Amino acid sequence: VRVITGLRDIQATTDAIRVVGQRIGVVPTMGYLHEGHISLVQKARERSDVVIMTLFVNPTQFAPTEDLETYPRDFENDCAKAEAAGVNLLFAPTPREMYPPEFSIVVEPGILGSDLEGIVRPTHFLGVLTVVAKLFHLTRPHVAVFGQKDFQQAMLIRKMVRDLDFDVEVLVAPIVRESDGLAMSSRNVFLSPDERSRAIGLSRGLHAGAARIAGGERNVSSVKAAIHRELPAGDDINVDYVRIADPEFLQPLEMLTSGTSVVMLLAVRVGKTRLIDNMVVPVPQ
Ligand code: PAF
């Protein structure tokens, strides 16, 4: 796979691709690729002629207390996986070029950015939206693909594209799970074997919630109780949130309305590893 690191190089390359009328599909990642990322590449491939993967562990979306230094990295392996998945160009800029010392302009995520993930990670989405805006200007995609696992992130990126008039179609690909249900994440590598086995409680919780809703439950407290019963428990477990919300604005619901759909969103710290997961379900008539 061809690797480009320079900002002006990628712009010149993507300009040339557009000039000959080819469609560009971009898959933004922070590397340490797993099957979830590969599914995003496949979706991008269906909708474009040239697939660009960006690989950049973006420092501005990590708080000083978070895991920027230890975030898993394996550039050689990522190149091999990207190549095997059919990525045409891998854009891997340096932090120094992305954020030169005089860098100061950012994208402010608005009110949704301080809810849910934003409560625990107040500067996170400002970092995400700023880097995604930069990556869009550099790679000039017709279509960009993000994973549903980061539901709030995907929603904020869609909103940024709408509010700031980016000419990019944002697609969201379904969560890819391990065979036991754990949502794939680069951070799963941090889980000890014991934590790993208890982490499946997140997807079990979502399935329990979905079963209650499918069975006719309309009271959110009862659905949440069913979810909580499945979540891992213990001194090393911290449930940051369990929210049942409308999938459009992520506002918490108290009662569910038949014929709508809702999203169940979870964030749980298992030991030192923070896991998120979600599921969108219909509320039957
Ligand atoms: O989802 C991610 O991996 C990151 O938040 C993203 C979108 C690549 C921005 O750094």
Image (tube, grey):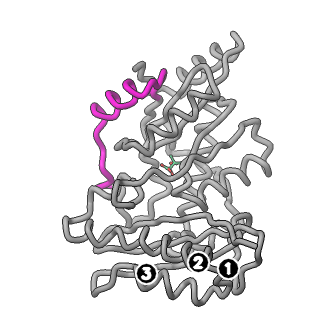
Give the residue at x 76% y 69%. Answer: 260
Residue pictured at 57% horizontal, 79% vertical: 212
The reply to whether dot 1 and dot 3 touch (C-beta < 8 Å) is no
- Mark 1 or mark 3: whose residue is earlier in sequence: 3
User: In screen coordinates, is 203 left or right of 169?
Assistant: left
Residue visible at 48% across and 65% down in the picture: 277
Q: Which element type, helix, strand or loop, lies under badge 3?
A: strand
Q: Amino acid at mark 3?
A: Val
Q: Label 2 to label 1, Cα distance in Å?
A: 6 Å
> Do the residues bearing badges 2 and 1 touch, measured as CB atoms within 8 Å?
yes
Q: Amino acid at mark 2?
A: Arg
Residue 119: mark in rendering: none
* Mark found first going from the N terminus, 2 or 1: 2
- Name the quadrant of the C terminus: bottom right
Residue 243 numbered tag:
2
Q: Amino acid at mark 1?
A: Pro
Report if the beta carbon of the residue with label 1 is closer than 8 angstroms to ligand 1.
no
Q: Secondary structure at mark 2?
A: strand
Q: Pinpoint residue 211: horizontal percent, then vertical percent.
A: 54, 74
Q: Is residue 73 left or right of residue 107?
A: left
Q: Regarding mark 1 in the picture, which secondary structure is present there?
A: loop
Q: Are marks 3 and 2 in contact (CB under 8 Å)?
A: no
44 is higher (above) or lower (below) than 186: above
Give coordinates of residue 163: x percent, y percent. Answer: 79, 51
Q: Say if 124 sits above or below 227 in the image.
A: above
Name the residue carrying label 3.
Answer: 239
Q: Which mark identifies residue 252? A: 1
Image: magenta residue range:
69-90
Residue drawn at (69%, 10%) of the image: 20
Percent from the top left, x then y, of residue 274? 38, 68
